[in-house]
Image: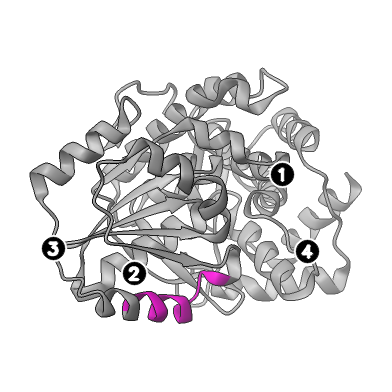
Amino acid sequence: MNSINDTLPANYIFNKPYEKLIQLLRERRPSKVFLLVDTDTEEHCLPEFKKKTEQLPINEVFTVKSGERTKSFDTSVYLWKKLAEHDADRHSLLINLGGGMITDLGGFVASTYKRGMDFINIPTTLLAMVDAAIGGKTGVNLDHLKNQIGTISSARLVLFDLSYLQTLNEKEVKSGFAEVLKHGLIASMDYWKNVNSKENVLDQAEYMIKGSVSVKSSIVEKDPNEENIRKHLNFGHTLGHAIESFSHKTMETPMLHGEAIAHGMILESYLSYKISGLEKHYLTDIITVIKKHYELKGFSEAEQNNIIDLLRYDKKNKNGNVLFVLLKNMGDAVHNISIEHDIIKEAFSYLNDH
């Protein structure tokens, strides 16, 4: 893909999102409406949501603790029980108001309760708006391992209210921006250049979000079940998810998703330079841009070994082989690339040097 498509899927709503929500409820007449939030969105986003949706008949609000550790099977059981206690049925609706943890968790709970009930995502973070809330992937973690249990199930609607971005701190904005950078690297060199044109990431929020929605939705439409090119969306995530899981296991303050993916993109860009033909000046460009936005961490040999060991849990693996997504060129990715551990160690040495 060399350019961004201006046409977005009909269920991704930017214009008058709450009017569309009310309209959907009038048309579908769900038996009950439930709202899922975490403690952060309950404080920072729920009051504004209630002001904008006074006509909305919410039967119950479910609140879970903020943080990635909440995205678990235990929390799913808790929410399934809550839905059952409040007589939810297959014709009920769950609205997920929050970041990627909430849209992943809520989508998983809704898609499995009574073998599937409707859900709507209202993402409140940049990460959720450009990635987690779109594309139909839902899931929870298995202990410290990312997204090991889940479904592919599309939200009935995804509603975008960019005012929620004002509730984010700088680290949370940067976490979402990593996925924006990834979309440029795998799909459009022009998009990559444009999203790097401003110092303040949120100065171009609408352009970024619509651009990333366009990139991801066009790929998902062609390959909904991740049998082929949808794997390209995992660029930076093979090592990035392993680093994120390692940080949750060993660090007092774990890395945010986007911080781990930023490291993963540097590592996998180096692998692209070594294996799939990415030119050296593009590798330099990538690390320069990422260093501008993220504080990079080096990894000792023991830490590298632990991270490499975690690669065996990657969802793209086949017959025990770890399969990577790499770049042939800016905006042009390839998938199902198997790489020896000594070359991965070489990539870590490159990261440590920078």
Q: CA distance from mark 4 to mark 3?
A: 41 Å
Query: Label 1 belongs to which residue?
Result: 171
Decide which of tag 4 and tag 3 comes sooner along the chain.
Answer: 3
At mark 2, the secondary structure is helix
Decide which of tag 4 and tag 1 comes sooner along the chain.
Answer: 1
For the stretch drawn in magenta, what is the main secondary structure? helix
Which residue corresponds to the image point at 61% horizontal and 61% vertical from the top-left? 241
**Label 3 sits on what residue type?**
His
Q: Is-magenta flag for residue 71? A: yes
Query: Label 4 belongs to which residue?
Result: 253
**Label 4 sits on what residue type?**
Thr
Q: CA distance from mark 1 to mark 3?
A: 38 Å
Q: Contact, CB < 8 Å: mark 3 with mark 2?
A: no
Decide: few, some or many residues near mark 4? Use Cα within 10 Å; few <14, some 14-19, many ≥20: few
Decide which of tag 1 and tag 3 comes sooner along the chain.
Answer: 3
In the picture provided, is 69 more to the left or to the right than 218?
right
Q: Can residue 229 be seen?
A: no
Q: CA distance from mark 1 to mark 2?
A: 28 Å
Query: Label 2 belongs to which residue?
Result: 109
Residue 91, numbered circle: 3
Tell us which disc is closer to us: 4 or 3. 3
**Stretch of the chain drawn in magenta:** 70-80
Decide which of tag 1 and tag 2 comes sooner along the chain.
Answer: 2
At mark 4, the secondary structure is loop
At mark 1, the secondary structure is helix
At mark 3, the secondary structure is loop
Decide which of tag 2 and tag 4 comes sooner along the chain.
Answer: 2
